[in-house]
Structure formats: C-alpha cells, structure tokens
Image (tube, rainbow, N blue to C red):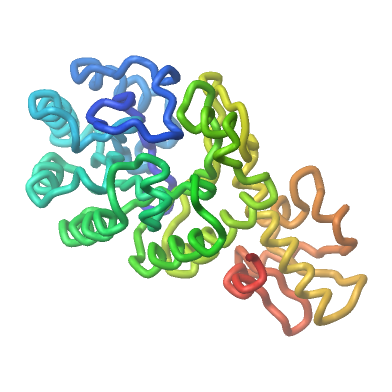
Amino acid sequence: MSSKSPIVVPVFISNLGCPHRCVFCDQSQFSEPIPPEDVPALVRNFIGFSRDVDFRKKLIAFYGGTFTGLEEPLLSSYLNVASSLVRQGIVDGLKASTRPDMVTPDILDLLVDAGFVELELGIQSMDDKVLAMSARGHSAADSLKACELVKKSGLSLGVQIMPGLPGEDRSSFVSTVDIIASIEPDAARIYPTVVMRGTALERMLLRGKYRPLDLEEAILRSLYAYSMFTANGTRVLRMGLPQSDKLDIVAGPYHPAFGFLVKSRAYRIMVEEMAGIYGEDIEVHVNPSDLPDLLGYRRSNMDYYKFTYKLDALVPRGNLVLDSTCLSIDDIIGRIL
C-alpha cells in the first residue's frame, strides 16, 4: 500500500477557526464550509470514484482553515465524525492544516486519539519582520515550538512556506529555508505569493508598498527550497497554487505548471554543469521517467541550451549521467541563488 500515492479526501472548512486576516488572504474566494454531518457522504463518494482503492492509503484532510482553532463544539463534531470513519475502516487516518500558534500538547493529544497521522503548519516565513508585515499574528519562535510539539506527538510534520511575502529578500528567504530544512519536516508545500483581488496585499501593491516576485525569481527561490528540503529527506508535495476557477489573481508569479517549471529548471542547471565539464554538444543520459523535466516546459530547455539525450532506465531518478559524471539536484544547490 505504501508504494502508491494515498487517496486524500479534502474537506474544506473555509477559514473557520482563523482569528487573523493575513494580507494575502481573500475571504470572498472561500466557499461555504462543509458541515460535519456531510463529511461521511463526501468521503464515501470521493473514495468511490478513486482508483486502486484497495491498494492505497485513504486519508481525510481538513483544508482551508485553522483546524485546531475551531471552537470546541465544532471541533468535537468534526473529530467524532472523522474518527468514526477511521474506526469503521473506511479511511486509514486523518490530517489537517493549521497555524503554528494554534498548536498545544492538549490539542495534539485530541488529534492523535481521533486517528490523525499528520499535521501541516502554515509557517510561511521564519523572519519576524516578514511575518509582521504579512499580518500573520505569530512569530518564528511560535513555528519552532509548534514543529517540536508535532514531532514529539508522533504525528508526521508538514510545513508550508510562501516565497515573496512583503519584506522578504533573498537573504531572508534562504534563512527561512535553511532553518526549516534543519528541522527535517516530513513534507512541505511551496506557494509563491500571489496578489488576490480585494486583499490588503492588493492595496499595498496599488500604493507601491509591495512588489511581487517575477516568475523567474519565484522559480529560483522555489527550486532552492525544493533542493534543500529533498536533500534532507522532506517530500515536497506541491509547488505553486493549484488551478481553480475561484482564483482571482491580479499580480504575482502564478503559472498553471509552476511545479514543472521548477523541476525542469533544475535539469537546465545540471545540463549547464555538464557542458562546463565536457564542453558543448553533449549527450546526457536520463531516466525515461525524467525526460519531460529534462526537456522543459514546451521543450524550453532544449531551446535554451542545445544538447542531445539518451534514455537509460539504469540512471537513478532525478539524475543526469555523462561518462563517469553523475549529477543530482543536490549537486547544484550552490548554483541556484
């Protein structure tokens, strides 16, 4: 079962439990939260349309709000419904996302008892100046404490970061990534900051108080984070916002294939490294599964730098080989930023 990706049933609680309004958050784009009594039918229906159900782990994920910040009656209702589905064997576990300042030992005990296996923390930055300018309402110290508590509880630790928040420069971002990588979370999501219509961030943009990252810088910063996290054993679950008809983005580095752009940039840098060793007109060997990343978005890597390739199933995933030289993403971290 563990070799296949899990079936994750999203249950959106649409910003319930969150006491803050971060500058990047647009409340008008949230749909109505799914009430606890509707969760069982939603879960059964979602699993019913999934493939390979008997061979994949099945999880319920509470997204879109601060799950551990829910008022006690509502939190208990969600936990009772979800834990019942775990006991019945319909799902194998539960997960949620929350704020670092909404994590306590007592809350974690409740989650573990209910069948939780993972908790994601919206860390966003480890720079207190950036957090303050983004109206996050918590500090970097809160994030460190929350990570420690989650790991101590036995739950898998997930983290989320947002390159390009107000007040962040490259140095601040690198420091954020290095600190989080040293914590060795189990999973991470990288969401470059975009400007949503109707947000405080849009007003900052219009007043000239904020400038979003361009796509190039967002790719490079995300690649640095991706490389550092994976080097420390952290699985990067997503890079860039998923496509949605509800997104009303007015500025910022949004791209529907952002994660692909990031990974293909890694291969472009590896090709350049190989060319620096062997000269031009190189033929690199790549695992067939990695060919799309090597070629790049709309074959942009081949347009950028002329090379040929040979498919070789013996090449480890994530590597390029030429003669006796084998490069991986770990080898190019120092070339990214």
Q: Residue furthest right?
A: 281
The image quadrant of residue 279 is: bottom right
Q: Along the horizontal axis of the image, is 304 left or right of 1?
A: right
Q: Nearer the viewer, residue 59 or 148?
A: 148
Residue 34 picture quarter: top left
Q: Position of residue 262 (x, y in %)?
A: 63, 52
Residue at position x 85%, y 56% in the image: 304
Quarter of the image with the C terminus in it: bottom right
Judging depth in this view, the residue of 71 and 9 nearest the camera is: 71
Count of numbered labels shown in the rendering = 0
**Among the 4 quarters of the image, the one containing residue 318:** bottom right
Q: Is residue 5 left or right of residue 269?
A: left
Query: For the point 90% across and 61% down, which residue is it?
Result: 306
Against 147, residue 54 (above or below) is above
Q: Of all residues shown, which one is farthest toward the bottom?
A: 324
For the point 45% across and 20% down, the residue is 29
Q: Would you say 44 lies left or right of 219 here?
A: left
Residue 300: percent from the left, percent from the top? Answer: 81, 49
Residue name at image x 61 percent, y 27 percent: 250
Q: Is residue 230 above or below residue 209?
A: below
In percent of width and height, residue 195 lies at 55, 32
Q: Position of residue 226 (x, y in %)?
A: 53, 59
